[in-house]
């Protein structure tokens, strides 16, 4: 099956969507804890994720790692096969239940919590043998779901202005679960509880836009301890299902954020980024990202292929106070359907790049400090995070040399946008006693200072 565009945003063979809730749970102001940055290690085997937690994510200060779906799915090499489950057994290409548990243990030992990508809106679009050996047919999944467990609308969604159609019909032929059924709700809750028992700390709810708020609230209410939830809800202008409907259950992926970053950085005009949260979800409910696996394939955001601009956008996201950042780390591709590479070649390693890890430390160091000292002109901007941090970005083609105003105390600081805090390697900047900084920021470069990285 191929991918298609719905409402201007990619909905792959895997349904993308959001979560609509009115339940008793309060929206998280950010992922629980002081370390609010997530790394999404897309299609990365569980064993490799565990090693990344120990070697990179924990030491860098990431609070969360998001992993791709843990379930048996349809066979095939394409990435989207992971998003067509055929059973709730963990028997996919990423590893089994023991591998998931070992990963969670390793991540927890490193101080990193685990978010599991949960595909619970639908099952497969066809029939066959799953990655764990399950023989299945559309609407018939032995020991799990039968025909009566699916919505009666057995056709593709055609009208995104019709809420009922969006939430009861089929997305690109995928068998749409009747999440209004108590039987279905109970089975989904049991599956999510089983992942919690294996060490998952929370969930990214895939395809949530295609499930009603009441249904999702009921599923969460059936769980013993639902943990942290973030919902994928793609904004569509004029559509009845909107992202802010879902903030009662947890945080929500803010797709408009990445689109806004692409527009600003590619146009060379960064002056409007100070109000990047305007017209979007409240900061307390928004999970931000520069790109994800859908948007890098549909062209709505910057991608790793944009090189320095992508890096600058990531620096901005991690420095600016709006939302809770999610760093996407996938693999190189030319075929949009291509699945993950084998071995160690072909992965972007975005989560481990020094400029990114340095900015994760920046985020942790500045905490909730307010945005001050805003300055922007054309393709350049600078701002402080109270007296805790300062960042300057230059998306232009020439060097930016000026005296910046900061709220930092005087001293010699490491530029964490380029060097590790513990090893500045001579990449330092002096802040005068009056808080000013005389610095040259190279073309397509950044300067980032914080009080926990001083010589």
Image (tube, helix red, strand yellow):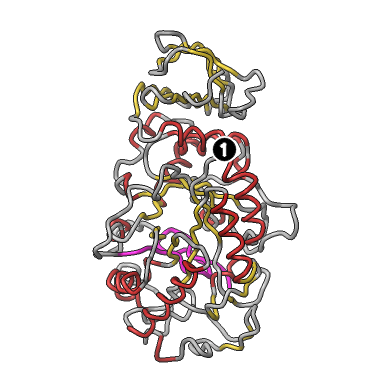
| Residue displayed at 52% across by 48% down | 111
Dot 1 lies on which element? helix
Extent of the magenta region:
1-20
Residue 162 visible, this orientation: no
* Residue bearing the label numbered 1: 356
Magenta stretch: includes residue 292: no
State which quadrant residue 100 falls in. bottom right
Locate residue 113, reporting x and y percent.
Answer: 50, 54
* Mark 1 neighbour class, 10 Å CA radius: few under 14, some 14 to 19, many 20 or more: many
Residue 377 visible, this orientation: yes
Q: Nearer the viewer, residue 265 or 220?
A: 220
Magenta stretch: includes residue 18: yes
Q: Nearer the viewer, residue 383 or 171?
A: 383
| Residue displayed at 46% across by 9% down | 432
Give the vertical position of 249 relative to 185 (above or below): above
Q: Main secondary structure of the magenta part?
A: loop
């Amino acid at each position: 099956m191929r991918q298609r565009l719905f409402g201007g945003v990619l909905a792959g063979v895997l349904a993308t969507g959001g979560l609509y809730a009115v339940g008793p749970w309060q929206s998280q102001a950010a992922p629980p804890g002081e370390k609010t940055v997530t790394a999404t290690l897309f299609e990365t085997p569980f064993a490799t994720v565990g090693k990344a937690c120990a070697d990179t994510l924990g030491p860098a200060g990431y609070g969360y790692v998001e992993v791709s779906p843990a379930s048996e799915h349809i066979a095939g090499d394409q990435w989207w096969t992971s998003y067509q489950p055929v059973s709730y057994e963990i028997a996919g290409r990423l590893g089994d239940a023991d591998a998931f548990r070992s990963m969670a243990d390793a991540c927890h030992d490193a101080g990193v919590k685990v978010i599991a990508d949960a595909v619970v809106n639908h099952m497969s679009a066809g029939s066959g043998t799953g990655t764990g050996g399950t023989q299945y047919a559309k609407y018939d999944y032995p020991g799990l779901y039968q025909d009566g467990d699916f919505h009666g609308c057995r056709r593709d969604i055609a009208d995104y202005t019709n809420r009922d159609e969006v939430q009861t019909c089929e997305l690109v032929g995928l068998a749409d679960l009747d999440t209004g059924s108590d039987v279905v709700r109970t089975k989904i809750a049991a599956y999510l509880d089983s992942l919690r028992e294996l060490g998952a700390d929370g969930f990214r709810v895939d395809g949530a836009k295609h499930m009603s708020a009441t249904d999702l609230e009921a599923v969460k209410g059936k769980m013993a301890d639902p943990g942290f939830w973030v919902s994928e809800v793609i904004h569509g202008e004029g559509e009845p299902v909107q992202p802010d409907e879902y903030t009662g259950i947890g945080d929500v992926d803010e797709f408009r954020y990445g689109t806004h970053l692409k527009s600003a950085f590619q146009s060379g005009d960064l002056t409007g980024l100070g109000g990047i949260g305007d017209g979007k979800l409240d900061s307390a409910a928004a999970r931000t990202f520069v790109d994800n696996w859908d948007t890098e394939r549909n062209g709505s955001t910057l991608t790793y292929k944009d090189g320095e601009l992508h890096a600058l956008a990531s620096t901005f996201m991690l420095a600016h106070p709006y939302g809770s950042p999610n760093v996407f780390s996938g693999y190189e591709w030319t075929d949009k359907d291509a699945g993950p590479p084998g071995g160690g070649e072909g992965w972007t390693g975005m989560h481990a790049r020094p400029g990114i890890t340095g900015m994760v430390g920046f985020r942790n160091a500045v905490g909730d400090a307010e945005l001050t000292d805003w300055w922007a002109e054309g393709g350049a901007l600078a701002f402080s995070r109270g007296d805790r941090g300062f960042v300057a970005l230059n998306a232009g083609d020439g060097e930016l040399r000026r005296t910046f105003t900061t709220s930092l105390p005087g001293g010699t600081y490491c530029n964490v946008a380029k060097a590790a805090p513990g090893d500045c390697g001579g990449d330092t900047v002096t802040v005068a006693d009056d808080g000013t900084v005389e610095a040259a920021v190279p073309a397509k470069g950044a300067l980032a200072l914080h009080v926990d990285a001083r010589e």
